[in-house]
Amino acid sequence: MSTLQQSLPWTSTPLIANAPMAGFAGGALASAVTIAGGLGMIGGLFNMDDVRKELRIASEAFAAHHALSSSKVLPIGVGFLPFVLKLEDVVPVIEEFRPAVVWLFATKELDDYADWAAATRKASPHSKIWVQIGSVAAALQVARIAKPDALCLQGADAGGHGFEKGAGVISLVPETADTLAREGFSHIPLVASGGIADGRGVAAALTLGAHGVVLGTRFLAAKEVIVHPKYQAAVLEARDGGQVTTRSKLFDQLHGPNPWPELYDGRSLVMKSHEDFLNGVSIGDIQKLHNEAVMRDDKGFSTGLQGRAAIWAGTGVGLVSEIEDASEIVKRLRLDAKQILSNAAKL
């Protein structure tokens, strides 16, 4: 854990980060997580002006915290989706704001991470590169070609997008750790994501060999998240996460042709669009109903699994039951994980 602590000196152990959920994780959420001793992340999508806006919000929030505002790097991470972005658009943002972490996820080809890593290091030498992957083989390939400063191992329980074929973190983390060690990459820290929503999940990930954790679904119930009220209500209502969520490429076909590379699909709450799909309704008809629904005030989101739009959430959604300040989420997860590990050691 010392490697991560050295590169992120404001963080406390265990390291807790919010996922860079594009469209959801902005400057308010990221700064709150960082100020609480975690790693706050901003999710970038298409428009780099929007990313700059959220980065400025975070920067302003750190003004009253000297240790954070005086750092060589902006003490947050920024996530980018290389398969829909151009390096020449992203590099100026990295140069301008010098985020502590540049998080890369979903290239068209795994080898593309090498180009993105090289360009990032040139633009901001003090920024650390984290790459999110979902298999042992991909972790080893990325370790060889991109030399990341950390790898985020995303298990199949994760909400949102990830590898279509994958394993849960309970096997993914230790097998990846063993493989990387055999191949001479044991120096690369691993962080775990997917199905982690409370202190028990944090503690479990650490015992599996992770150096920290990344949570997405849990922070959908943070006060600072950017989210439609109906979307958030559906997350808070959901129970039995393995039954009310599912992975499918359908969710990326709702607007039109699926833009994601073949390697990926996504996990959402099961909703009317998916129910129609299982009942044999044509993709064209599903898209028509979806695109009509998202024009309403509710944007196609609804409770009771009755919406048309995807509601990205992991299997840990059943453990999310109340809206809280992001800082309280981070602090409680940290405290609970420490207590659980202490109790386990006594056994």
Image (tube, helix red, strand yellow):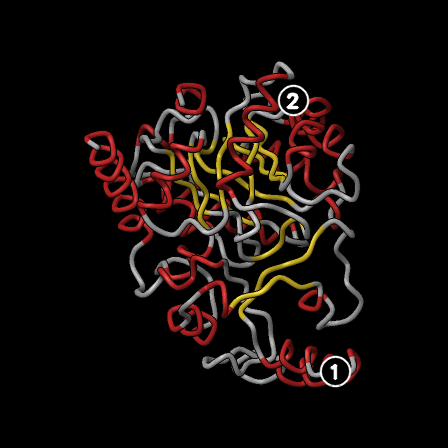
In the image, farthest residue toward the top: 184
Examine the rendered structure and indicate whether residue 334 appears above or below residue 296. Answer: above
Look at mark 1 in the image and give the residue it sits on: 280
**Mark 1, secondary structure of its residue:** loop
Q: Residue at x 36, y 38 (%)?
A: 38
- Quarter of the image where the N terminus is located: top left
**Distance from label 2 to label 1 (Cα)?**
45 Å
In this view, the residue in front, 35 or 323, is 323
The answer to whether one can see residue 127 in this image is no
- For badge 1, the amino acid type reads Gly
**Left or right: where 261 falls relative to 276:** right
Where residue 321 appears, x then y in whole percent? 32, 65
The answer to whether one can see residue 150 in this image is yes
Res 183 quadrant in image: top right
**Badge number at residue 147:** 2
Query: For mark 2, does the 10 Å Cα neighbourhood hold few (<14), some (14 to 19), or many (20 or more) residues?
Result: many
- For badge 2, the amino acid type reads Lys
**Mark 2, secondary structure of its residue:** loop
How many numbered marks does the figure carry? 2
Where residue 288 appears, x then y in whole percent? 74, 84
Q: Residue at x 49, y 53 (%)?
A: 25
